[in-house]
Amino acid sequence: MNYNLQKKLVIFGFLFIPVGLLMLFLLYPTLKLFQFSLTDWNGISESFSYVGLKNYVMAFRTEGVWDALSNNLLYFIMHLVFIPIEIMVAVLLNQKLRASHFFRSIVFMPYILNGVAVAYIFSYLYNPINGPLNALLGAAGLEGLIQSWLSDPNVVNYSLVAVSLWRFSGFHVILFLAGLQSVPQDLYEAATIDGANGWHKFRFITVPGIRRVIEIVLFLNVRGALQVFDIPFLMTQGGPGTSSSTFTVYTIQAAFKYNNYGLASSLAVMLMLMIIAFSMVQSKLLGGKGDE
Amino acid sequence: MIRRMSSRVPVYLFFILISAIVLFPVLISVFTAFKTGPELMKSSPLALPESWQFGNLITAFKTGNMLVGFRNTAVLVVVSVILNTVLGSMTSYILNRFDFRVKKLIMAMFMVAMVIPFYTTEVSRFQIIKSLGLYDTIFAPLLIYAGTDLLQIFIFLQFIEKISSQLDESAMIDGASYLTIYRKIIFPLLLPASATLAIIKAVDIMNDMYIPYLYMPSKELHTLSTALMTFVGQRSSDFGQLSAAIVIVLIPTIVIYLLLQKYIFAGIAEGAVKG
Amino acid sequence: MNRGKWAGWLLTCMLLVTVIAGCSGGNTPAAQNGGQEGKESKGSGEKVTLKMAMWDSNNDFITFVTEKVKEYSSVKPNVSVEVESFKSDSDYLQAIKVRAGGGALPDIMELKPNWLADFKDQLIPLDDVGVVDTNKYAKTYAIDGKVLAIPSVSFPELVYYHPSIFEELNLEVPTTWPQFMEVLTAIQQDGTYIPYAMGGKDAWPDYPFNEFLPHILSDNENYLSDLAKEDTPFGEGTPFYQAYQQIAEMYNAGVMGPDPLGIGADQANDLFISKQAAIMASGLWFVPTYQGKAGNLDDLAAFPMPYRPNEDTPLKLMMFTDHFYGISSTSKHPEEAKAFMEWFYSPEVYKEYLNAAQLDSAFEGVESEVPFLKSFYGEHQPDNFIYIPGDTTYTELSNAIQLDVKALGQEMMAGKSVDDIVKDLNAKWTEARKNK
């Protein structure tokens, strides 16, 4: 059989469906998104006209967009703050601990639970009338900490970020744990012989050893934080008012509530660019550190 | 190395605290699911149910369309995971073993796909689904889920790299076609990685609400997520029934998780890290 | 060398597939429809399924409609009608809009009066449907002179209360805003009951105030459209400002329980139904919900929203027209859909619909049987004030500035001042008008 011909056939045959699906369901809609972002289409009517970059200018000048984005920033920062904690938990799990398998299962569990169900569970937990969280604080003698969890504009975003942390931190821990397990044990032993203390081992063996995982988690964090949607959408619809809106919630509302599909498309394009830009900055920063 | 028991106590306490934080919301939902309406009004939400009443669970199961949800979710998960695994491994095989001009371009396209913001692209995607005649059929989400993604390709690529190409070459000397090489050599060796990816994909599909919500509005096509959303929408203040529906939706995921967690952790350790 | 060439082909092929799929998707729905409409046979042989989309907060009503439309198959054996239901209008609206873009609208769809202008390209004129002639409101809501949807019901917006609580605390039914505030404060001071049940976690339950109060206070049914004619229609001296000051007075009086923004509409309803709260404003459609949960209407009465500052002007009652049904222009069976509507709004069927909805009739010659409404009109005989949605210009402006008065209500409950709100609105409104 002629391997050259066969090769062509197999490349074509194997790639046709996956690449076709990719183009059909992901790339083509994205191209359309670029197109719509230059129009004043309302999402329903059969005609639209091109308005140049007006939507982009508009997006920059709209306060609501920035307010929403600042909420995304909170998700990003809080998840960032949690990364050291997550690494610490992973380090502890990596020790020869009795029941460490059990704890590992527990830590990872929130990630696999149905997101819709999780959002509803927390809506109930935060309930102001006979709500479990307030009852718990009451039982612990911490009535002073009781808040209007979902109705105080100054508190609501923290309440929602907490849900996000609850759901995704465990996943990060498991990723870090996997990274730790791939660091060769003899490196630590050699370091011990050289008289390195715990911190030195952590700083010069562990951290470089899991650098790649840190990169992955940071990318997931950027992408996740910028795209947060289902938690505010299901729990508060961005309310009260617009105080817990996020960039994606804002985009969806612009498109479907206010018939401004052009603006929504430009926001979506900007979101893509932001994810790319942030990821590049991050990998630059990390890369620089690695070269030192 | 000396391990003093005392130094371990804070670590255990720490993990017990974490476990409590993780389990608290879930356990509260379970308790609430077994409480009657009047009991919910008067007793503390933290209390155990006075007696374990199955009324809420039965109502939620029957009127919540849960059986249909189970069935559709199961079909979606099984079929799309199989398709996804096959397509993903095929793509990775080609990308690793062959050189051709547009390879970089194809990789770049998969990379772009990683940052596409979902939700807003749905209007254009909807037009495609509609024009293919797939709207309000189970094939719409199936095709969307079946598509492979960059993360999957990366993980497969790492595995294929480890499969020596000498294996391919000796098979070619025996006259095996590329298809046979993929089928008999590559794919079987990718199965351990596939298991993990399949589980992660399955979790994603089980938890997705937006795609079924948009593309399969019919009641007969509800998935667990959309059935839950519909059920909760209809009684958002009856926390007993709400929790019952939540518990029903969570049970299959938790069972699968407990049964398969060995593979999940092994796979994450193998795949996601050694790149 | 060959390799590169064929790979180029591969890519071209795939692009082609994509583009073909894209083009067929991009066709305008109307163009696709044109062909099909012409081909449609009016004969009875062809099997036809009509999809009908609706939403309702009352599950029993959804069940009723779902079952009722099945009976149409006994009138027209070849036609079956399937209901697709949503719980809330916002979920419904989003799903419908995505489908409108893809040309996959249901044959028959429910609409709110203020959506008609948005969907005018997606709806076919119904002027030739016979039942339109006996509809009391269809022509009021015509767009560009064409009836695009048939309203099924009309009902008053009411303020509900528990007479037993008013009796216990010796309270009179208020007819002016100051009296209303007095009543609320008196209940608050007594301390037994929450004066007003507000489900502020969902944005919509504040609509009797934030959406309707400026409208009715203006005493101008075309108020919303008129807003679009001014640059600064929200500032001091306007009905909007006046109404929002009144609303702020109420929201800031602490008469809505400990955390009105923390509880949703359903929970607020439960507070009222279980007599933990004394007063709640809502449309007439709340009565069946109440009856379903409380078992009877013994301790329920209502009065018109006492929006007026004093007794010098007559107190009017906001009437809302709702449950509009239209036929989508992408329907493959518009004639069958029209025939179905003739049946649906025939007096016998419509009467049952009305009784299930427990709302007031929108058709001449069919009277609703709602005892609660009878007793309400027995005690109160206010003039009607018909809710007229804003015109296209108003809709465009309010979409451009993303005006959501119900979300504004939430912000007010969270402490935002009226002056800040109107300043912001005026600035945005002026600019939006300039950009038009």
Image (cartoon, grey):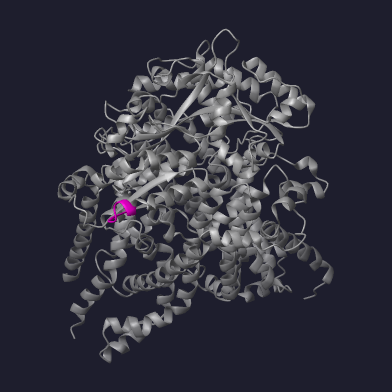
Say whether residue C28 is left or right of residue C306: left
Residue pictured at 18% horizontal, 78% vertical: A5
**Residue C357 in sight from this viewpoint:** yes
Residue visible at 67% across and 49% down in the picture: A125
Say how many tags the image has: 0
Instruction: Pinpoint residue C171: horizontal percent, then vertical percent.
Output: 72, 21
Q: Residue A204 at x, y = what percent?
A: 62, 63
Can residue C18 be found in the magenta stretch? no
- Where does the C terminus of chain A fall, quadrant-wise? bottom right
- Is residue C77 highlighted in magenta? yes
Depicted A89 relative to depicted C2: above or below:
above
Q: Quadrant of the N terminus of chain A?
A: bottom left
Q: Nearer the viewer, residue A153 or A257?
A: A257
Asked if B120 appears above or below B5 in the picture, the reply is above
Q: In the image, residue B149 lies at what x, y percent? A: 39, 63
Q: Which residues are the magenta region?
A: C73-80
C364 displayed left or right of C273 = left
